[in-house]
Amino acid sequence: MKAGIEQRRLDTTRPVAVWTSLDLLAGRPAKSLTVILRTVGCRWNRCIMCSYASEGAPASAEELVVQFHEAMKRLSSETNVVKIYTSGSFLDSMEVPPEARQKILDDLHSRGIKKLVIESRPEYITPELVAECLSGLDTEFAIGLETANDLIREKIIKKGFTFDDFARASKIVHGLGGLVKAYLLLKPPMLSEGAAIRDAISSAQAAGKHADMLSLNLCNIQRGTLVERLWERERYRPPWLWSALEVLKIAPHPIICDPVGAGTRRGPHNCGECDDAIAKAIRSHDLAQDPSIFDDLDCRCKAAWQKVVELEEQSFGTPLM
Ligand SMILES: [Zn+2]
């Protein structure tokens, strides 16, 4: 049984995952297809919350194209948005060889896809590669900025690039007519709940000046990461969903948030009773972009969360619950 799982994990002819969902396209809901290609994985591979590398396996250019075609079987005639993710950087030629990248872009162009979303670290966002994407497709370049604070990004998250690197990449994309999405991380370790909320809000305000779309990622506990080790020693708790609402209410829009793992111990959570309702409201907000959707949410755990935010200020960031 274990051997079977292992073999599937390393299968370089099938994508890691493929799913359909609804996305905003020019302010309206549109059908989208998300594909995660199995590549060798992120070349950086040092961020303390990320276990992407464990999904990686060295896939050749031909195998990546096979994976892509396999995923495209899920495409319906109404799909307008395609997201091609790699657990790394689509524009890193060591990860996605140029011939695979070109075949994928040509194929999407010929299918009449309205918008492509890819992810990349800023160092691979060059005018040549941006132009290559944009020559056939409206493309959104998603960058994992995480926070606008260089100290937190560099010293805690170990991301290995600066806000200026992000801004430079964004300028290249905008100069050529593309779109930029910035991912922000709610609650890197070492930050109290309140400090994490403030960091996410100020990051959204700073990143919003360089991005067309913000995406708030709620930190969850991935296996084999430093964040997992801190969590096991009770030195880290994933963010409260109340904290996510606080950020989504104040941050500049458009901002989206997929509360992955909401309500679980490893994911963002409240008391267990209100988690489903709040996660549902967060997902509705993605399409509605109206924070008043959160106004009626309440639970008796909200007072406990407020107390945590208040008291952790005095406990030097040690999580209280
Ligand atoms: Zn609750």
Image: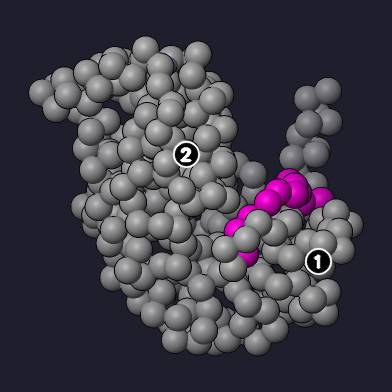
Which picture quadrant has residue 83? bottom right
Picture disc at residue 65: 1
Inspect this view and state whether residue 226 appears.
no
The image shows residue 156, relative to residue 63, as above or below, that is above
Q: In this rendering, would 39 be left or right of 79? A: left
* Residue occupied by mark 2: 293
Q: Main secondary structure of the magenta part?
A: strand
Q: Amino acid at mark 1?
A: Val
Q: Which residues are magenta?
A: 13-25
Q: Residue at x 23, y 33 (%)?
A: 194
Looking at the image, residue 264 sits to the left or right of residue 35; the answer is left
Q: CA distance from mark 2 to mark 1?
A: 41 Å
Q: Say if disc 2 is inside 8 Å of ligand 1.
A: no
Q: Residues within 10 Å of mark 1 (few under 14, many from 20)?
A: many
At 31% from the left edge and 35% from the top edge, which residue is drawn? 189
Across and down, in percent, residue 300 comes to 37, 12
Q: Quadrant of residue 218?
A: top left
**Nearer to the camera, 268 or 158:** 268
Q: Does the magenta run of residues contain 22?
A: yes
Question: What residue do we see at 31% from left, 47% from top?
Answer: 250
- Element assignment for label 2: helix
Along the line of sight, the residue nearer the viewer: 88 or 19: 19
